[in-house]
Image (cartoon, helix red, strand yellow):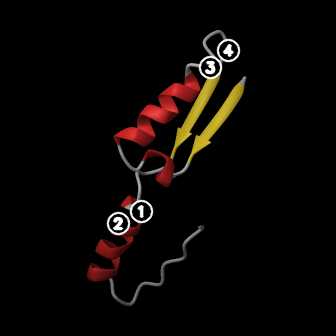
Amino acid sequence: MNVFKFGGASVKDAQGIQNVIGIMKHFPAEKIAVVVSATGKTTNALEDVVKAFLPKMVLHSTN
């Protein structure tokens, strides 16, 4: 089995998603697992929302 992980920048727009699809097409007969992060800058936007409502909360990014 192959496992593929695509970060947010890889799927930030339609072209990026098409690129991921193109990569997957290279493995038609294999078992694969695909892990996809939130699309470009979505995590940052969610952190901004949390910070706006919980200004004293300390957030730690894993990036």
Mark 4 → mark 2, Cα distance in angstroms: 35 Å
Residue 33 placement, left or right of 59: right
Is residue 12 placed above or below 28 in the rendered structure? below
Question: Which residue ends up furthest to the top in the rendered image?
Answer: 29
Q: Earlier in the sequence, mark 2 or mark 3?
A: 3
Q: Please state which amino acid type lies under the numbered disc 1.
A: Thr
Q: Please state which amino acid type lies under the numbered disc 3.
A: His
Which residue matches tag 1? 43
Q: Tell me the SS state at disc 1.
A: helix
Q: Please state which amino acid type lies under the numbered disc 2.
A: Leu
Along the line of sight, which residue is nearer the eye, 13 or 44?
Answer: 13
Q: Quadrant of residue 46?
A: bottom left
Dot 3 surroundings within 10 Å: few (below 14), some, or many (20 or more)? few
Which residue matches tag 3? 26
Q: Please state which amino acid type lies under the numbered disc 4.
A: Glu
Disc 1 + disc 4, Cβ < 8 Å: no
Q: Tell me the SS state at disc 4.
A: loop
